[in-house]
Amino acid sequence: MTASRTLKVKPAYTHKFKKGYPLLTLDALLDNRVDMEEGDIFRLVDERGAFIAKGYYGRQNKGHGWILTSHEGEEIDQAFFDRLVAEAVCKRSQLYHQSETTAFRVFNGEGDGIGGLHIDYFDGYYLIHWYSRGIYAFKPLVLQALENVVSYKGIYEKKRFGRQGGTYVEDDDFVKGEKATFPLMVKENGMKFAVYLNEGAMVGFFLDQREVRKVIRDHYAEGKSVLNTFSYTGAFSVAAALGGASKTTSVDVANRSLSKTIEQFSLNGIDYEAQDIIVEDVFKYFNYAAKKQQTYDMVILDPPSFARTKKHTFSATKDYKRLLKDIIPLTEAGGMIVASTNSASLSMKKFKRFIDSAFKEKGGSYNILETYTLPKDFKTLASFREGHYLKVVFIKKEF
Ligand code: SAH
């Protein structure tokens, strides 16, 4: 990670990088290739050799590395990491001071100046996600930066780079400090969630839906029957039940979802036996519910961007409209559909077009009441649209 290579950018891409685009892709380079080691520092220059920016090489499914600075004289050293981590922590100072919320994102990749690096906070513990071997090469500097900037109970990590890239490396995720006892109990706007930092890539709940859970609890759930699909550990069901839902039904195909959902309900003092928790493929459940003419006041759709089960392959960019068409008949007139996607390649515009044509094809009418994107701690760049991956639309079904 000491070498510094010079990479020439195609004229058509120069402007984009000068405007702050953070991701290095091969098609942007004059000779369409790089010959570097993970973690090497590169200098991007234009066709005539004039400096544009500096970055590090790291293979991710997204690209080949990230821009770190547009200042030629800036060294990528301890002081650089200290400064960026300190700035990121400072921007979250409000969250650090909220006693009702003890879990949030501290460092959000390129949005905070270093693509491929995420750091989350869970009640005194820090969880670092490394998205390439390249960024992992800077581990000593990142750990030292945390040491210099915050006090912590312990640090855990997720190496999210496998041989195929992008996959999670199964390992002991403890790094240093005090080991946590799991489940770690965290709070989010007063709701409680059980978190496991040492059990695979997913920790038990998704921090980016904080605002959506809150608005469901505070404004939409009271007295409502709620169907939560792709429910994972049931975080949306917990929010709805705490908001006074008459009943929640959580559906997820993964076996683990049953015990995990029971755990989240119990932590929050909700009688899980009064709720339905169903381990099944949602598409199979839709058929069953349609046959029984079952309807709900609120349906939450939060599928992964891609999923493959024995019977179905789901891709948000191809199949979200079909999903909407499946649930429109299961939603009461006057009821709500909360449609969420974390697919970076499905834009809000296209997502709304799916919603529109799903209703047209089903012959119904709707109104969009609210939309949500990432909360502020998931800092993004205006120059990098792919970073704004979350879109959540609250759709009222009129008839
Ligand atoms: N909505 C959740 C997060 C969803 S994560 C939350 O708020 O926490 C995606 C989930 O979809 C996973 O738990 C996975 O098991 C589930 N899943 C994927 N394909 C599915 C299918 N066809 N039917 C039911 N669940 C599915």
Image: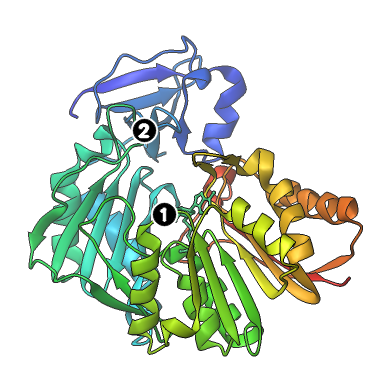
Q: Say the numbered circle drawn on residue 332.
A: none
**Residue tagged by mark 1?**
254
> Looking at this view, is 351 or 266 the one in front?
266
Q: Earlier in the sequence, mark 1 or mark 2?
A: 2
Q: Secondary structure at mark 2?
A: strand
> Looking at numbered disc 2 in the image, what kind of residue is underneath it?
Lys
The spot of residue 289 in percent (x, y) is 68, 63
Residue at mark 2: C-beta within 8 A of ligand 1: no
Q: Does residue 242 appear in this view?
A: yes
- Residue type at mark 1: give it: Ala
In this view, the mark in front (1 or 2) = 1
200 with respect to 311 (left or right) = left
Q: Nearer the viewer, residue 228 or 376?
A: 228
Work out which quarter of the rendered image holds the N terminus and state it. Answer: top left
Quarter-of-image position of residue 6: top left
Q: Is residue 186 left or right of residue 349?
A: left
Residue depicted at 89% across the width and 65% down the height: 365
Image coords of residue 229 (percent x, y): 57, 62
Image quadrant in which you'd find residue 219: bottom right
Foreground pick, 370 / 256 = 256
Q: Residue 40: x, y in percent?
A: 25, 27
- Compared with 184, 18 (above or below) is above
Left or right of 281 in this view: 77: left
Identify the disc placed on residue 54. 2
Label 1 sits on a secondary structure element that is loop
Task: For label 1, count other residues whose C-alpha is less than 10 Å away and answer few (under 14), some (14-19) or many (20+).
Answer: some
Please state, as top left, top right, bottom left or bottom right, where the C terminus lies in the image. bottom right
Residue 210 visible in the displayed image: no
Number of numbered tags placed on the structure image: 2
Circles 1 and 2, Cβ within 8 Å, touching? The answer is: no
Q: Tell me if the residue at label 1 has its CB under 8 Å from ligand 1.
A: yes
